Amino acid sequence: HKDYSIEKLFRIYGKNFVVQEFLEQSDVLKALNPSSLNTLRILTYLNNEGVHILSSVLRVGKLGSSTDNFSTGGLFCGILNNGALKGKGYNPKGDVVTETPTGVSLKDCKIPNFKNVQEMVKAMHHIVPYFKIIAWDIGLNKDDLPYLIEYNTHKLGVDMQIADGPLLGNFTDEILALALKKPRLSYSY
């Protein structure tokens, strides 16, 4: 929080906090819910032929919330390859949502600069090739340029297939075959 002193941050969080630059988001994403950083969750798969985008969804926070988390009451909506939203989103109850909390119609919304977002995540996946599937959380800054928020290699957001279709798509058989072929690691604690 910008009004907190360093001393107050240490009192509230102890040693468990991160300080990062504030991202002023794209006007298009801000219109969907100004209180949260609304992000794109892009799932990529790396195989011998390159990086493939498996799924793309927009995550919009609950009105008044500072996070875009679906689990805290937000919504998500699938994104078509051209950046247009699929028109139907879903809330945590599984209800169909056709507009954001601010009244923006999902079917009339298009993600700006979506081709650059796709190119960015494909390029980044080559930097960490030891992960075959990665879920990228991407924001768009005030100039509509993609901005990496984080990447996830665990708990990728399987629930997003509700809004975007089968998660692994045409690569389902290939990925399952790889998973079954690899020896399982066992951990003892």
Image (cartoon, rainbow, N blue to C red):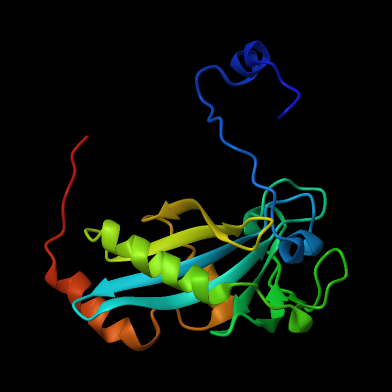
Say above or below: 72 vs 108: above
Determine whether 10 is above or below 42 in the image: above
Instruction: Tell me: 169 left or right of 97.
Output: left
Q: Position of residue 66 (x, y in %)?
A: 72, 45
**Residue at the farthest right position:** 103
Q: Position of residue 103 (x, y in %)?
A: 88, 70
Position of 184 with respect to 119 (left or right) is left
- 136 and 91: which is toward the camera: 136
Q: Is residue 81 left or right of residue 69?
A: left
Q: Quadrant of the N terminus?
A: top right
- Residue 29 sits above or below residue 56 on the image: above
Q: How many marks?
A: 0
Outermost residue on the front side: it is: 143
**Relative horizontal placement of residue 59, taking residue 136 as reference (left or right):** right
Quarter of the image that includes the C terminus: top left
Quadrant assignment, res 112: bottom right
| Identity of the residue drawn at 59% across and 21% down | 13
Q: Give the x, y percent position of residue 23.
A: 64, 46
Question: Residue 101: image x %, image y %?
Answer: 84, 64
**Residue at point 81% right, 63% down?**
31
Question: Is 148 in front, or is 144?
Answer: 144
* Snapshot quadrant of residue 140: bottom right
Q: Residue at x 50, y 19 (%)?
A: 15
